Image (tube, rainbow, N blue to C red):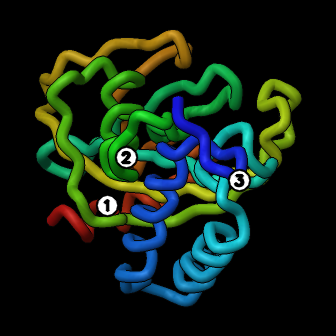
Amino acid sequence: MTVAPSGVPTGYLALRADAMTRLEGWDAPDAQQESWRKELLEHCRDHPGAMWKQGPPQHLTTGAIVLDESLGRVLLTLHAKAGMWLQFGGHFEPQDPTVLAAATREAREESGLPDLLLDPRIVELHRHHLLAPAFGRCAEHLDIRFAGVVGADAAYAVSDESLDVAWWPVDGMPPETEAELGPLVRAAQRLLS
């Protein structure tokens, strides 16, 4: 692995450049998303290791929400560390060529859907603190999220990072999931319809 003079593996620097280009070109749909867009860009400018799990305790991550063709059901993972139903996603790897490729890799790994394709447009940004000791030195995730569609009969699987994977009606997710993911699901429905 090649390391830059900053000590950051060069793959993460390329991902940082891709993230900045995507964020600079994204028209945020509302004031909260615009605020997070500016915060993520500032974080990338200030931290060469912004994409690296070993970088600052606040680092960029990626995620993907997966809906069925009717856009009425959402495929979620029962996250092993968080203990709640969430979207697919995680940390960047130095071999990921782009932010979208990383989101696709994470979603495929965690859903067991090897042919899953994501829409290349950012669907939502999210910033959340991590309080559980299970997250180690990660204090906060600054998430760039995408969306994809699969058939309702797609053969998904549970990964090592999940306790379960299941379809949920978008209007019938668990209350804590609705609070966390409701805006993401609705943004994905708008983007994909």
Residue at x 54% of width, y 25% of height = 78
Residue with the mark numbered 3: 6
Residue 152 vertical position relative to residue 100 in the rendered view, above or below? above
Residue type at tag 2: Ile
Image location (x, y in percent) of residue 69: 12, 45
Disc 1 secondary structure class:
helix
- Tell me the crowding category of disc 2: few under 14, some 14 to 19, or many 20 or more residues within 10 angstroms, Cα based: many
First-in-chain label (1 vs 2): 2
Q: Looking at the image, do the residues carrying marks 1 and 2 touch, with CB atoms under 8 Å apart?
A: yes
Residue with the mark numbered 1: 188
Residue 172 visible: yes
Q: Which of marks 3 and 1 is in front?
A: 3
Image location (x, y in percent) of residue 100: 32, 51
Q: How far apart are marks 2 and 3 (CA)?
A: 34 Å
Residue with the mark numbered 2: 65
Q: Distance between the residues labelled 1 and 2?
A: 7 Å
Along the horizontal axis of the image, is 104 left or right of 124? Answer: left
Residue at x 52% of width, y 10% of height = 160
